[in-house]
Amino acid sequence: MAVKETHSAGLETTYILRPNRSLKTGQVCLATGVIGAALLGVTLYFSMQGAWMVIPFTGLELAVLVSALYMQCKWSQQQQILEIGETTVRTSKGEASDQGVSFPKGWLKVALIDAPCSWHPKKLIIGSHGRYVEIGAFLEESERERLALRIRSALQ
Amino acid sequence: MTTTTMSHDEAHHHGAPTGWRRWLYSTNHKDIGTLYLLFALTMLFLGGASAMLIRAELFQPGIQLIDPDLYNNLVTNHALLMIFGAVMPAAAGLANWMIPLMIGAPDMALPRMNNLSFWILPAAATMLILSFVVPFFPGGGTQINTGWTIYPPLSVQVGMSMDFLIFAIHLLGISSILASINIIVTLLNMRAPGMTLMKMPMFCWTWLVTAFLLILVVPVLAGGVTMLLFDRHFGTSFFDAAGGGDPVLFQHLFWFFGHPEVYILLLPSIGVLSHVIPTFARKPLFGYRSMVGAMLAVATIGMVVWAHHQYTIGMSLGAVTYFMVGTILISIPVGLMVFNFIATMWRGAMTFETPMLFAIGIILMFTFGGLSGVMLAVVPADMQYHDSMFVVAHFHYVLMPGAVFGLFAGVFYWLPKWTGNMYNERLGKIFFWINVIGFNITFFPQHFLGLAGMPRRIIDYNVMFTEFNVMSSIGAMIFGLSHLLFLYIVIQTIRGGRSLKKSENKSWEGAKGLEWEVGSPPAFHTWETAPQIK
């Protein structure tokens, strides 16, 4: 996980939240390509020997592998931006299509709540007037707790 | 961005779930690792019981205890239970427990898939055991008499138990593939900040390579057994010469999986040794980069030399020469690994706790198995040794020390971390000595039996082979029963008690790595904040 905290004029504090990841997208593509090429070689060789029934199994396996890597990459590429301004607090995904949600700073409530199932981690939510947004869903438990403390202190 | 209504704002800490749901629905890597290890231990005893029955029958020439069909059935099931039921799940158990702890990840990348990959195993084991017992029921057909290689045309003629076996292999393959994909994704994308691939612990490297190997070879086996299923029930002739098929094609498909499978079983144990030896020699691993390189070389060459199991099928001279040279070439990177282990121990402040005893035993006995492997790699010599007890002795010297002793070393090394209790060192050492002596009494004489001409997979033998078979059977009983002591040590360590010392976070003085930074036993959730690696 990475929590990047910046301070600038006008915007008091900005938090950029991202999950931890150890490979860049290009490297993941490279790894997938290497595995895919090796699997393709094996499949072609045995298909040419008459064992074409290998094809559906290698295909299925490659599909699961690519799906797993894609899901993991997509998960690890998500981000959430929390901007604490002079009068408002705004949270967004940092994408052009996402307008984000703003709350009045003075009324903002920050809370860690239990998930409906006790096995699941707690949720960090912010909001006011009955509207709440979960932030840092991809963070770990202790990271969420520390982030909650940092937001509370930034609000004061 | 979606908004929600807050239900309650009181924060409560939650601990580990309890009851059967904890295990059935678990997505926690430690719990799933424990499940894998317990499953493997159960299969070890089932596979061991079948081996002891085989050796009891071979104690004397003649047919004493079991009939030939049951003997062949036992031989088949022993291999499958040990390879797919015991060793692979045990290695997966170590991987599940240790990989997230070692790389500073909170869990495996795909925890639900992790749960699925384990829970497929009991279903597969049930199918496997059914393949053994179905012939004893009315209408159950003939017993499986093919051995684990299930070569056609024999496997096409066997009764319905072969169908159970084929489906068991499919399920085991699915489980292995899902576990491998999970491990690859975890190791590639969930390492702690700063932990580059070349800073990754050696155990993780060995599992990364193992997972790649599994991904490459399991679909070929799946294709092969599916073609076999089609030949049995749907009128195809993939492997039937009368219908234009080729039975040798199945051998190629099988051994394309079967030979890398040796390295799949072996490499995780090499990973364990790469931690055990530096810990008890109190020196860093000698030649980390060369170890990684050697491992990649073993995996690469190991993928393309499968037909050395089939020298006698009548390949062209060029083909057998290629497979012979390729096979002998593997001894170079394997020799480099052994050299690195010895160099790590050289002038180290060594102590000889149970994991280290196993490590040294592995180096000696695995090297011995490797040398008999070089003998078998040479085509003219293999023509003599093929299908003899020499081959049985060889692969047990490779797989028992190379894979199983490595797993024992790993269990003794990490048991204090898992349980929070130090195991009884005296009992551990007694287990090591009984186990190793029993192993050598069992399998060393089999070299001589093979060289003297005793074939493998036979229930009866010439009286001239009696003495060595008696020795081998006595050794097998000692070896088999010694595992009860292992079970006792494990249970005693799990239960703890005043007679056992509590383990510190760092169970061994010379141990290094992230896994020793967390508690012993580790909390239900670990590395909730990723550590920084410098």
Image (cartoon, coloured by chain):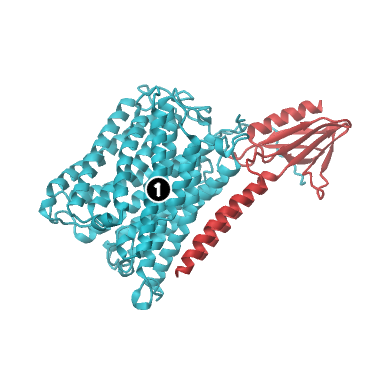
Where residue B297 appears, x then y in whole percent?
46, 47
Q: Secondary structure at mark 1?
A: helix
Residue at far bottom of view: B243
> Residue B72 appears in which quarter of the rendering?
bottom left
Residue B392 vertical position relative to residue B429 in the rendered view, above or below: below
**Label 1 lies in what chain?**
B
Horizontal placement of B194 versus B230: left or right? right
How far from the left and from the top, in percent, is residue B308? 35, 57
Mark 1 nearby-residue class (10 Å; few <14, some 14–19, many ≥20): many
Q: Nearer the viewer, residue B476 or B207?
A: B207
Is residue B111 toward the left or the right of residue B74 in the image? right
Chain A: its colour in the image is red
Residue B261 placement (x, y as % from top left): 40, 51
From this viewpoint, is residue B462 visible? yes
Q: Quadrant of the C terminus of chain B?
A: top right
| Location of residue B14 in the rendering, given as x and y in whole percent from the top left corner | 59, 34
Q: Left or right of B274: which side holds A113? A: right
Residue displayed at 30% across by 66% down: B140
Chain drawn cyan, letter? B
What residue is pinned by disc 1?
Answer: B330
